[in-house]
Amino acid sequence: KEKLKSPYIEYLKASIPYQEMLKLLNHYEVILDIAKPQQNGLSLRIFESLGMNKKIITNNQSVKAYDFYHPNNILVIDFNDLAIPEAFFKLPYQPIDEAIKNAIVKAHALSAAKNNISATAFEIALKQLV
């Protein structure tokens, strides 16, 4: 498959340790999250963006059903229409209520355990929230 060529995209040949990846995310205003077609639920990118108070662009339609969803913070794209409105980048980030963040931590800790998500990676992502 041919890679998309853009001065805004950097392709990495090696994986990055999770802690280092989180440090890199701090340098960006917007995070990109691409869910796999068979994916159920939210990825860690969503939780990381919440914890870091960063905007996120995702193709995961289910994020709209969550209490923390705000269109200023989360842009849901469709692969059939990849238009990303410039206005999304200009709108101010809307802080998420701490009670909602705490509820997310409790609800998804159990989910992570049930789905055998790496405890270390999940704990690190949760620390971003609290």
Image (cartoon, rainbow, N blue to C red):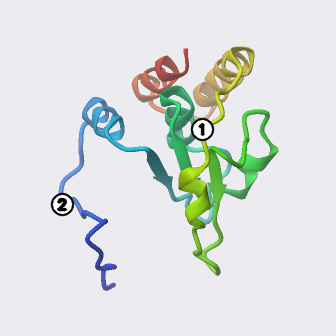
Q: Quadrant of the N terminus?
A: bottom left
Residue 59 location (% of width, % of height): 61, 61
Residue 6 location (% of width, % of height): 30, 75
Q: Quadrant of the C terminus?
A: top right
Q: Quadrant of residue 43?
A: top right
Circle 1 Cα neighbour tier, 10 Å, few/some/many (<14 / 14–19 / ≥20) = some
Q: Residue at x 54, y 48 (%)?
A: 56
Query: Is disc 2 placed on a helix, strand or loop?
Result: loop
Q: Is residue 102 left or right of residue 116?
A: right
* Vertical order, 32 against 112 (above or below): below
Q: Is residue 54 left or right of residue 92?
A: left
Amino acid on which disc 2 is placed: Lys
Amino acid on which disc 1 is placed: Tyr
The label shown at residue 93 is 1
Query: Is disc 1 placed on a helix, strand or loop?
Result: loop
Closest to the observer, 36 or 116: 36
Q: Residue at x 41, y 29 (%)?
A: 121
Q: Residue at x 60, y 75 (%)?
A: 79
Pointer 1 or 2: first along the chain: 2
Closest to the observer, 41 or 103: 103
Residue 70 location (% of width, % of height): 72, 42
The label shown at residue 32 is none
Q: Which residue is mark 2?
A: 13
Residue 9 location (% of width, % of height): 30, 66
Circle 2 Cα neighbour tier, 10 Å, few/some/many (<14 / 14–19 / ≥20) = few
